[in-house]
Amino acid sequence: MEKVILISIDGMRPDGFLNCGNPFINDIMANATYTLEGKTVFPSVTLPCHLSLFHSVPPERHGITTNTYIPFARPLNGLFEQLKLAGKTSAMYYGWEALRDVARPLSLKYSAYISAMAEEHVDDRLTDLAIDRINKTKPDFVFLYMVDTDEHGGHGHGWMSEEYLGCINKAIANVKRVYDLFHDEYTIIITADHGGHDRTHGTTMDEDMTIPMFYIGPRFEKGKVLEKSSILDIAPTIATIMGVPFAPEWEGESKA
């Protein structure tokens, strides 16, 4: 049975990834099927983007276009719900409270939230918690969300600022911790939800809409560059890897 760890680094632009100064980026690209030209959805805002990631439909279909959640007008299963129906166990570790709505109640077996507004370096602590949980019970699917890049780096100091690049450097260091421990047991997927410009995001500018995406695991060719990839493809790809049916409404295509 194949298992997956999904890591979302909020607001990470491809050029931010390339210029963050962490040498592990070279290992990521060498071992992954990847793109530095992936596309997110509009509006390029955190909650709509993550709801599209997990439900494989654009915001005009799930109906959330701001960072305030409202119930879907039409019922739609996301990845967490499909995994639950298939008897899989899921875990989620996140630093922004609004993200709790990407998973319907009762679809998670394990979760932890630490507010990025209340303390610094929550990405490190969330990574610690995810690692501890994986070591203890090996959940089938683990979602680790890193928020410092967006909250403290992009909005706090500006996209492509020294502070922003430093936040990506730290996020990649956490990715390395997860990779070193678990890449033999789990497929690891690394993505961003959106990019950013100046000290904001949410537009159709390339800086906001273009994201890096990396797939590392036995189903993926090392060093292969994807010609076309969307954030809508992530849920179908994970479902394929884990042998779980797609929800019929999903629009993305599997890369596995």
Image: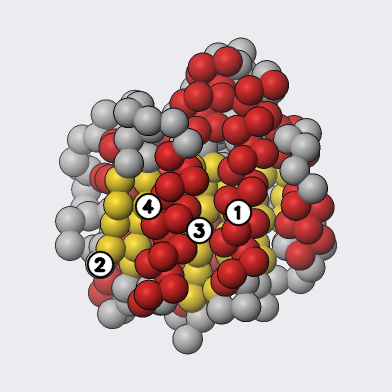
Label of residue 109 in the image: 2
**Lateral position of residue 157 relative to residue 101, left or right:** right
Which residue is located at x 28 percent, y 80 percent?
A: 87
Q: Secondary structure at mark 2?
A: loop
Q: CA distance from mark 2 to mark 4?
A: 12 Å
How many other residues sit within 10 Å of disc 2, few (<14), some (14-19) or many (≥20)? few
Tell whether 64 sits left or right of 10.
left
Dot placed on the residue nearer the N-terminal end, 1 or 3: 3
Secondary structure found at label 4: strand
The amino acid type found where label 1 is placed reads Val
Question: Is tag 2's residue or tag 4's residue first in the polypeptide sequence?
Answer: 4
- For badge 2, the amino acid type reads Lys
Mark sitting earlier along the chain (2/1):
2
Q: Is residue 14 visible?
A: no
Label 3 or label 4, whichever comes before in sequence order: 3
In front: label 2 or label 1: 1
Q: Which residue is mark 4?
A: 93
Q: CA distance from mark 3 to mark 2?
A: 16 Å
To which residue does mark 3 refer? Answer: 6
* Among numbered discs 4 and 1, the one appearing first in the sequence: 4
